[in-house]
Amino acid sequence: MLKLFERHIARNLKKTLENNKSILLLGPRQVGKSTLIKEILSKSFIFDSILLQNPELRIHYEKDPSRLIHEYELDNTNNIIYIDEIQKVPALFDSIQYLIDEHKKKFILTGSSARKLRRQEANLLPGRLILHRLDPLMWGELGLTKDSLIPEITVPNISNPIGYSMDESMIYGSLPEIVSVTSEQRKEILKSYSTIYLEEEIRAEAISRNIGIFSSFLQLIAFESGSNPNFTKVSNETGISVITVKEYFQILVDTLIIHQLPPFIKSARRRIAKTPKYFLFDIGVKNATADVPLEKKLVNINRGSLFEHFIILEMFRRQRLNNNFRLYYWRTSTDLEVDLIIETNDKIIPIEIKSGKNIRMPDLSGLNAFLDEHNLKKGYVISQDLKPYKLDNRIIVIPWNYL
């Protein structure tokens, strides 16, 4: 039996329902959307479930989306209707709007892709549906964090440590099922993830004749995760046209497999990079899809890149949870770079990510240049040191678990 994890987003979802609003919860496959919703609803609410992965039920509503109204307009026994995989029948949104506007029902809708909803011009009910995003497990849900030294981005522990380490996270990621099972089972599950994704999502995008080509593209994209997408390079290495590469890349964005980190372009003195970096949503899925060995030696070989993914993916998850800051990176034409820029309404917080210990000033030329250019008094280095310390009057080194 899989372990049931406390999730930070649960409080936000309950608050939305208590405010008499409906929910659209999006997230990649296997991040725990169904488990979380069923846990919340079973404790406090009366509800009905409509699971659209059931082909018979899906066809039932595809033939006549208005049947949702006929089935529930006069039904006063259920306060909430939970519809899973809503992207499979986008035409239901008009019926959902009617039932919401007539104060008949509240809804929780879950899905793994915004692409089909957008392509079919689904009515996403602005003002009626509150959008939430669910990611793989955060540090605080694994009991990994200590007291944060940057309060603007803090998300505290809500669980005691469960014995799942940073190194395990950098090999296997943090999908709930992965954390719950043994290392051998983790390998098997992760190896099947991209196959399941290709079958469920990509065949649904009507490119099944090219699924082998897409699979090769996906492997290369996973291997290059953490970089700026070079569509010409990918085209040359896969034999796919640049136009098709861009289309495939957008599919990954729309199906929530890729997060994009935009450049920080508020600079008057230097030429700076203006294309986003991209990161696969989970390190374990990235490693398995790139076909690298899911072994402890992987961390020793590729610690720098994996540690950067580990930090930046956590920051994406915190940003989506609280939505009170924005994330960027900064790189100049002369290759001065800062890995992560956090911008709040009144503050800019530059962060350099170093996977080692005993950080030296010569390694921080990009961070110092950014501090100078933007007249900032404080910057941070995230490292694997055991304790925080000041490197000089304006640079503080913080162990990763003090974020």
Image (spheres, rainbow, N blue to C red):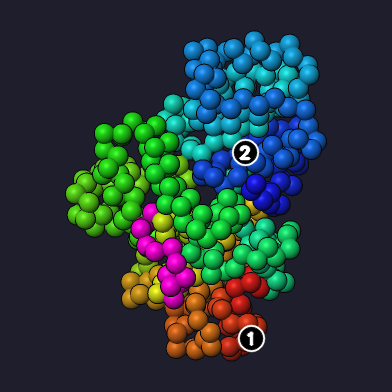
Kind of residue sitting beneath label 2: Ser
Q: Using the rendered image of the protein, determine whether residue 376 is visible from the camera's viewpoint.
A: no
Residue name at image x 70 percent, y 71 percent: 146
Query: Pointer 1: what residue?
Result: 389
- Where residue 275 appears, as percent x and y from the top left, is 37, 58
SS type, badge 1: strand
Residue at figure coordinates x 79%, y 38% from the top left = 43
Give the answer, above or below, for where 335 lies relative to 13.
below
N-terminal of the pair, mark 1 or mark 2, is: 2
Left or right: 105, with 173 as reference point: right
Judge the density around disc 1: few (<14), some (14-19), many (≥20) Cα neighbours within 10 Å: few
Residue 374 percent coordinates (x, y): 52, 74
Say which mark, if any, is on residue 50.
none
Q: Choose top left, top right, bottom left or bottom right for residue 65.
A: top right
SS type, badge 2 = helix
Specify whether 52 is left or right of 294.
right
213 lies left or right of 156: left
Looking at the rendering, the stretch of residues picked out in magenta corresponds to 289-300
Q: Which label was assigned to residue 34?
A: 2
| Residue 179 against residue 363 in the figure, above or below | above
Q: Amino acid at mark 1?
A: Tyr
Q: Is residue 298 located in the magenta-colored stretch of the structure?
A: yes
